[in-house]
Image: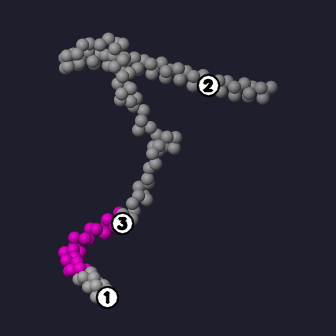
Amino acid sequence: MEHKKDFEKAVEKKMEGTIKKVVKVIAMIVLGGILFLLANYLLMRLWNWLMPDLFGVGTVTYWQALGIFVIAKLLFGFGGGGGGKSKSGSSHKKKVKSSNKCTSWRRDFDEWKHYDQFWKEEGEEAYKAYVEKIKNEDHDKSEEE
């Protein structure tokens, strides 16, 4: 008897959850429809307020505004891309963690802050010595041939 009551309570809870989900889905569909119709009405009002004065075009009816709205959505997209997150909480694109991104390059770049000082102190002399070394190596190679 007690098992039967527990089973009935579990079924009632499951049905309550299912009914709540169905009501939420229906409410979202109705709310979405109302928002769509309101956006279409707003488009019609804005068109009739701005376009005749600015560009000299005629006014539109509600259904013509609906057509403009649909054409605009087809041409410019439905706004569903880019900002969404996947279940893991990150974007669908693979992100590189900043902790391991270009660490060797950053370390090398930090060493460049000494470049100007080196060039002032030793750079020109070091460069001339390097050029002399290359000339001597080329001279030695040409003598061997």
Q: Position of residue 142 (x, y in %)?
A: 28, 85
Mark 1, mark 2: which one is toward the viewer? 1
- First in residue order: circle 2 vs circle 3: 2
Q: Is residue 29 left or right of residue 110?
A: right
Closer to the camera in the image, 71 or 31:
71
Q: Is residue 99 left or right of residue 139?
A: right
127 versus 19 height, above or below = below
18 versus 89 height, above or below = above
Stretch of the chain drawn in magenta:
106-131
Location of the C terminus (image quadrant): bottom left
Q: Position of residue 116 (x, y in %)?
A: 22, 70
Mark 2 lies on residue: 18
Mark 1 lies on residue: 144
Location of the N terminus (image quadrant): top right
Q: Does the magenta run of residues contain 113?
A: yes
Mark 1, mark 3: which one is toward the viewer? 1
Dot 1 alpha-carbon crowd within 10 angstroms: few under 14, some 14 to 19, many 20 or more: few
Callout 3, which amino acid? Arg
Q: Report, in whole angstroms, how far the alpha carbon at label 1 lies from the one at label 3.
A: 43 Å
Q: Residue furthest top?
A: 61
Mark 3 lies on residue: 107
Residue 53 circle label: none
Callout 2, which amino acid? Thr
Residue visible at 69% across and 25% down in the picture: 11
Q: Is residue 14 left or right of residue 112?
A: right
SS category of the residue bearing label 1: helix
Callout 1, which amino acid? Glu
